[in-house]
Image (tube, rainbow, N blue to C red):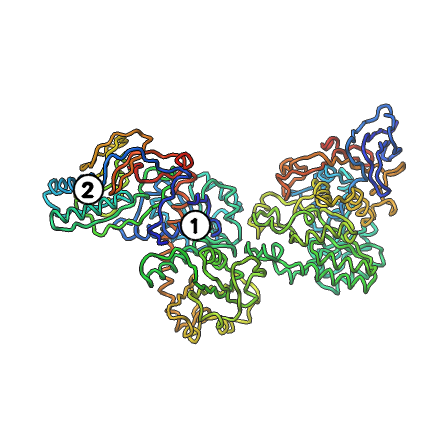
Amino acid sequence: MTAPARHLLSVSDLGREGIGEIMALADSFKEVSGRTIPKVPALRGKTVATLFFEASTRTRLSFEAAARRLSADVMSFAPSASSLEKGESLRDTVETIDAMGVDAMVVRHRSSGVPQRVTAWTSASVVNAGDGQHEHPTQALLDCYTIREALCDRHGGDPPSDFAGLRIGIVGDVAHSRVARSGVLAFSALGAEVVLVAPRTLLPPSLDSWPVKATADFDSVLPALDVVYLLRIQAERAGRVLLPGLDEYHARFGLTAERARHLQREALVMHPGPMIRGVEIAPEVADLPSSLVTRQVRNGVFVRSAVLFHLLGSGLGTERIRDGGGDA
Amino acid sequence: MAERERKLARPQGRVFAPRAQVMDADGVSRALRRIAHEVIERNHGLDQVVVVGLQTGGVPLATRLVRVLGEIEGTTVPLGTLDVAFYRDDIGLRPVLPEEVTDIPVDLTGATVVLVDDVVFTGRTVRAALDALADHGRARAIQLAVMVDRGHRELPIRPDYVGKNLPTRRDELVDVTLDGVTIGELVDERAAR
Amino acid sequence: MPEPRVLVRGGTVVDQTGSRRADVLVAGSAVVEVGEAIPVPARATVLDAGGCLVAPGLVDLHTHLREPGGEVAETVETGTRAGVLGGYCALVAMPNTEPPIDCPSVARDVLELGRKALCEVAVAAAITLGREGRQLAPMGELAALGIHLFTDDGAGVQDPSVMRQALEYASDLGVVLAQHCQDDALASGGQMHEGAWSSRLGIPGQPALAEESMLARDLALVRLTGSPMHFLHLSSAGSVDLVRRAKAEGLPVTAEVTPHHLSLTDAEVASYDPVFKVNPPLRSAADLEALRAGLEDGTLDAVATDHAPHTPERKELPFEEAPSGMLGLETALPVTSAALRREGCDVPYQLLFAALSWQPARIARLDRASGGRQGGPVAPGAPANLVVYDPAATWTVDPSRLASRSRNTPFAGRQLAGRVRHTLVEGEPVVVDGAAQR
């Protein structure tokens, strides 16, 4: 078994084995949520702090629920509302929170790389909850979990241990999307074939050493896709004229009713939410993925509990002892 | 490879080297039959009894126990499995991961739970199991059945049903399966060859 | 009263005439004798130069001294102290101060501060008022104060017609315009080099084209106007090619490169540490190799530090919010030496000091041929502005022990080979055994 990393800054911190462990742990937390008392004492006495420098109620609440499932104490900081405006630096904020004695910091920031910088200023485990355009590892993990769950529901039996043979298309503003970057890493680590579907202006300037294909012709790849992952068009992040307009985007890259007819019958359609009907997806087709979107949200809590347990509870660097004949 | 077959990795380079078999398959069988009779006697039948096997060593024993109880009384009691990884008191000190998903098919409120494990040693796993069971409902009673009691208790935990009392040294290991009970120790993989 | 005497003993003198074992005797502010085994005069300070190279003091074409307005990060005093510790005897102060050096009064203030500093401070003034790129600054009045270089550095002059007017106006005055080549539209807010790393790290990048397109434009303007130009901190292979062709054509252009562009690539940004954020950005390994080759073949004339101090608070901001800039004065010599003199590629020390001393002295008109006091050669009658450099001394860069007020060196924690042992400014030993004397 891989020794658990102290931080989760990027999907690549986990590797294929690590992702598998998170999936299995998430199964356990799914089971816990079905109990009379849906809580375990695994992280009792530990404190998890959320530092959301970029607002996101949904993700923050998801992490807080995940921590509470493990009986951890939760502190939440929304520094945008507080001392950062008085001139307290990022480093001061982190060191102050660290001094209060926290075991994990869940950090979201609009600038890439901030969670990595934070690791230098605290002895807590740092979880990247979204940094600029760089990564959003727990989103990719819950997306993997959701796909795995859907495949398992469809075929019955045990969940697949990897995505070998699966074709996943990621559609939209890849260049500015941290969800896409983490998704590419996670899906390809599990053996899926990943294709990026976007106009050149919305692809990263260099796809050197990315394990993906890229195309601007959605229609040519659509019928072969097992999963269609639609990204949000992030006008607020792009900040400049990369597209002639949203109508043209919808015509070339939207999941229109016409395109939906060419989807494989069992293809999964996913979206990190919230969807913009009429842009990424036609209103009449939008109900297809909405049930998966709810599942994505629910699975988010299981997966984030798994991540917190993996970082704080599963034991660091100590030798494993087989349970049989051991310590009952 | 299906997820459920995934086993804990052995500690780096160390393997179980058996030294002596203290019970063979027949011995284990007889002990389980005796325990089944004791359970029925103690509980005046099998009304409201639920058998829960502790992952992973207790599960085959629990499964066999349910079958034997069925052979004797003609009723099949519910069987559950329990992984206590999230309830251990040594979290953060040693690597723990749940090995199998917990599956308790009934609400335990008002039930008499017979918790089954292969070996009782320090008692800490049983303590964790008691905490875990509490999160599934308020049982009327919890009884502990083990194939081997090897001594060295660190908590006030006492099994109700025991297959065999086996004094051991702390550093020894006891391996229990339906095929028998063996004492041995962990040795360096290279030394064992 | 007899002049103070200093004997620099046991070193190897390197200057534009060659390299030879020699002692150097200094009296007052001048070199009086250069030769083997000079007898020690009475009451002379002896500086041991055993194992060292003795060269004309270094001249930096590009230093940000931050005064006026940015004193919290650096002052003329602390900056020149950092300079002499790095072997520099003259610095050209950049005009992007608050207020900018775009008028005689501010220029005079800075020149005055320079007179009290530890080494010579020359001043570069802005090309346009406020460095806004629209109206010409009073170059004539500024030239009358002795200012020779003009630049809006920190930014490039975006409007080509403004640049053309500036070149034509400057040609009457005999001054030289220097350009920070960066087309803001093409750079479009990029924080690092646009390439494989920026794509992976999720940081907006600016392509090399943002520098090369303005360089190409200005070379065409040089061709049109006949006015000379100097190009600041070139950073890409494409830029080196453009300058090579321009020089082959005979255009009157010079170019500089920084020590950090000769030694670091965009891979460093993987740590997201803003100490590696600089403008122009660190680029690819291929660009780095082209810059080294350009310096070796003379396409690039000088190494200039672009020493840019920023307070720790500002350099600890998230990468995308932090200001650009790196310290450079105290590490320039060993870093440049290591970049040029690596395995199987032993560039002579003469080329190293040419790039750091007499060529920049010439470009800045601080050399003796222009009536200045820098750049050697090391010969009787020359001003005693000298650096004594020990190429074998190793040291670890500790940001808290640098003389600069700021700490933003990209070489923090790295071990460097080569250290300045002594520096003489106008005959005065301002650095002795690696320690500043005031």
**Residue C141 horizontal/vertical position (percent):** 81, 53
- Label 1 packing within 10 angstroms: few (<14), some (14-19), many (20+): some
- Label 2 packing within 10 angstroms: few (<14), some (14-19), many (20+): many
Foreground mark, 2 or 1? 2
Residue B27 image-quadrant placement = top left
Amino acid type of the residue that numbered disc 2 sits on in the rendered structure: Ser
Query: Residue B29 has which mark?
Result: 2
Q: Is residue A82 left or right of residue B151?
A: right
Dots 2, 1 in contact, CB < 8 A: no
**Residue C382 horizontal/vertical position (percent):** 87, 38
Could you give the CA–CA distance between mark 2 and mark 1, rounded to whole angstroms? 39 Å
Q: Is residue A61 left or right of residue A34?
A: right
Q: Is residue C109 visible?
A: no
Q: Is residue C209 left or right of residue C21?
A: left
Given residues A132 and A146, the one toward you in this image is A146
Quarter holding the C terminus of chain A? top left
Q: Using the image, name the chain to which the residue with label 1 belongs.
A: A
Q: Using the image, name the chain to which the residue with label 2 belongs.
A: B
Q: Is residue A96 visible?
A: yes
Amino acid type of the residue that numbered disc 1 sits on in the rendered structure: Glu
**Residue C119 horizontal/vertical position (percent):** 77, 39
Seen at 62% across and 48% down, the residue is C276
Element at badge 2?
helix
Where B164 falls versus A190 (above or below)? above
Seen at 18% across and 39% down, the residue is B31
Element at badge 1?
helix
**Residue that label 1 marks:** A17
**Residue C87 horizontal/vertical position (percent):** 75, 38
Residue C420 image-quadrant placement = top right
Quarter holding the N terminus of chain A? top left
